[in-house]
Amino acid sequence: MMAFTRDWALTPSTLVAYAGATWDWHRLHHDAAYAAGRGLPAPIVDGQMFGALLAELVLGWAGPGAVLRSLHLRFAAPVYAGETVRCTGQVTAVNLDVVSVDLRVEVPADGRIAVRPAGAEVGLASADRLARLRLLTSTGEILG
């Protein structure tokens, strides 16, 4: 079945921007001195940020007009400011215009799995894309 991947660098600035967008200003997510005082190497990435990254991954893959019908995820390990994460989706089923996707988030630098299990269902808007996806999932080929 088809897989898709995207890497994100989670810089301190990225974490502050996310905190501002969500109004979640807990110091653990942006204050390096506060995190160090608790024995952490750096501020911890807000767990809900992984939901946003996975939603962006799936919707970016599915294309314009796609609708995220459901998303679930479980945190497995912390990720710290300054690390890069790799988000991966794997199509597991196609049912009419709804695609089921298995998801995960890992830190490529050390192979740490940050989010697993995770998954989503996305409604596709384009009949052409759906036809290509059905062919793709049945043949294992990647079509342009």
Image (cartoon, helix red, strand yellow):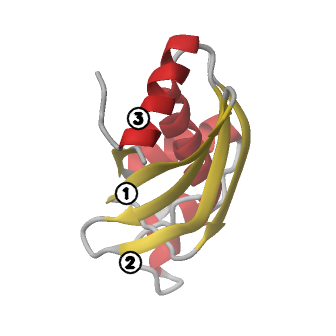
* Residue behind mark 3: 136
* Residue behind mark 1: 85
- Marks 3 and 1 in Cβ contact (< 8 Å): no
Residue 86 in view, yes or no:
yes
Residue under the point 71% across and 42% down: 23
Q: Earlier in the sequence, mark 3 or mark 1?
A: 1
Instruction: Where is residue 93? Give x, y as percent.
Output: 60, 46
Query: Which quadrant, please, contains the C terminus?
Result: top left
Instruction: Report the front residue among 51 and 36.
Output: 51
On screen, residue 15 above or below 129: below
Q: Amino acid at mark 3?
A: Leu
Instruction: Where is residue 36? Give x, y as percent.
Output: 45, 78
Q: Quadrant of residue 135?
A: top left
Q: CA distance from mark 3 to mark 1?
A: 27 Å
Q: Earlier in the sequence, mark 3 or mark 2?
A: 2
Q: Amino acid at mark 2?
A: Pro
Residue under the point 50% across and 73% down: 78
On screen, residue 20 above or below 82: above
Residue under the point 56% across and 68% down: 116
Q: CA distance from mark 1 to mark 2?
A: 17 Å
Instruction: Where is residue 70? Give x, y as percent.
Output: 74, 43
Mark 3 closeness class: few <14, some 14–19, many ≥20 residues within 10 Å: some
The tag on residue 41 is 2
Helix, strand or loop at mark 1: strand
